[in-house]
Amino acid sequence: MPEALTLGREMTVTEQSARTYEVRTYGCQMNVHDSERLSGLLEDAGYVRALEGVTADIVVFNTCAVRENADNRLYGNLGHLRPHKIANPDMQIAVGGCLAQKDQGEIVRKAPWVDVVFGTHNIGSLPVLLERARIEHEAQVEIKESLETFPSTLPTRRESAYAAWVAISVGCNNTCTFCIVPSLRGKEKDRRPGDILSEVRTLVGQGVLEITLLGQNVNTYGVEFGDRLAFGKLLRACGDVEGLERVRFTSPHPAAFTDDVIAAMAETPNVVHQLHMPLQSGSDRILKAMRRSYRAERYLGIIERVRAAMPDAAISTDIIVGFPGETEEDFQETLRVVRESRFANAFTFQYSIRPGTPAATMPDQVPKEVVQERYERLVALQNEISWDENKKQVGKVLDVLVAEGEGRKDEATHRMSGRAADNRLVHFAVGAEVPRPGDMATVEVTYAAPHHLVADGPSTGVRRTRAGDAWEARHAAPPASPGVLLGMPSIGRPPQAPAPVSSGCSLTS
């Protein structure tokens, strides 16, 4: 048991009867990554995770401010907990994340049964604030305006034994008119390359096979310390880490995408040939209104160069439909770019007003019914393209990193699931040797659907890995509790392309 947290008097967290916690996460990958840190902090202070179905002694909401009606969702959930709080006055409720950074003391005014409010810059303060609130019997609101401690230096409880997030930067220097995140996460702050690689090596030593480099704009990494080629160098350095089999990253900004990164992807064996690069719109007029500092032809040029260097590259994107002032002509430009890009998949979003953003007060807001009709046309086109691209995989032999919880119908179909190197989801039949999550299965694709592949023949081989050993070791011990109860995106491992998050979120670039 870690050293107990002592505050104010001689009572410690560990002297209490194993207080339990639950973390509920909403929003982007950075929030999911932060929640792993929050869980680690709480466990380091002596708390234990709550059993499923049991209301925890401490419930932490890690919030998102970019989703439509995010505040209504939070206050609705807080309202559901109020009877539990009344029945158990020792229960504590904490609210953190982007919405907390934005609303600050307003949260306690609207929901006075909340005990702690903390922001995006001081997640490391959570255990101290909880203990202070318990001792003083008073809500603690602490919001910092700049980063206190880089989150990656904090304790963590990772959700996966075989894949991990590694944050290389936090914050954003862009001013997209649909996005409030830069004002909540602050200016970009970069970690030193040595610190990042040290974390990567530690993870690999623990059995991790796959990492995802994480940042609001990963390809502007290094600008803070004066090296504009630092991200490509970091990718190449990851190639020198023995035992690291797959390297991914999310998300790059098209305006900052440089050819040295393409070369690093193509020439570093463990950097996968998969790229998630937000488009947002195919109309130059709308891109200008969004304050996106690139145009459609530049975007298409990047894709052309990526595919010239890596013909097998799977490319995905984010697209907003119905941004203020979007005309049918603008929308047709988006459809044109989608047709030319041949995305493996796309996360598509209907524009909705985000209070506090410049776009919220723009004239010519597009009527809801028009946005819906355009959205349906875009989804239909992209599904057709995704299906066509997936059909090209039929007959191919793929190495699949076996996952936990990726296939919701696996039990019924007697299949297992995992991700190919290009991030395609593969459901495969189990042969004589049953792989563990974290192991590698070699399978032949027999069927393609728009959003997944199926390999119904027996796997041609299973490679047992250190990651599988690590997963098995986790599950060999008696389970004290389930994983962190994450709202969205749901994870058992880091998703290999951004989960469906709201456009304008910190990771949609």
Image (cartoon, rainbow, N blue to C red):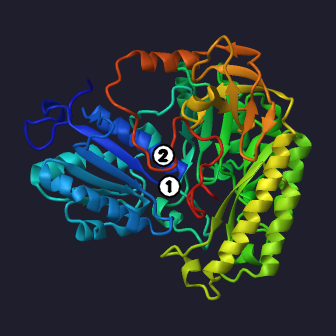
Quadrant showing the C terminus:
bottom right
At a point 72% along the width and 32% down the height, the residue shown is 420
Residue 326 image point, x, y percent? 72, 80
Residue 379 image point, x, y percent? 73, 61
Position above or below: 29 against 379: above
- Asked whether, in this view, residue 9 is left or right of residue 29, the answer is left
Q: In 3D space, how far apart are the residues under numbered discs 1 and 2 (Cα atoms)?
A: 8 Å
Secondary structure of the residue carrying numbered label 2 = helix
Q: Residue furthest top?
A: 432
Disc 1 residue type (three-letter): Gly
At a point 64% along the width and 64% down the height, the residue shown is 349
Please tell me how crowded label 1 is: few (under 14), some (14-19), or many (20+) other residues with Cα within 10 Å. many
Disc 2 residue type (three-letter): Val
**Which mark sits nearer the N-terminus, 1 or 2?**
1
How many numbered discs, if any?
2
Quadrant showing the N terminus:
top left
Quarter holding residue 5: top left
Q: Which mark is residue 138?
A: none
- Judging depth in this view, the residue of 456 and 479 nearest the camera is 456
Position above or below: 403 against 32: above
- Judging depth in this view, the residue of 178 and 253 nearest the camera is 178
Q: Which residue is mark 2?
A: 32
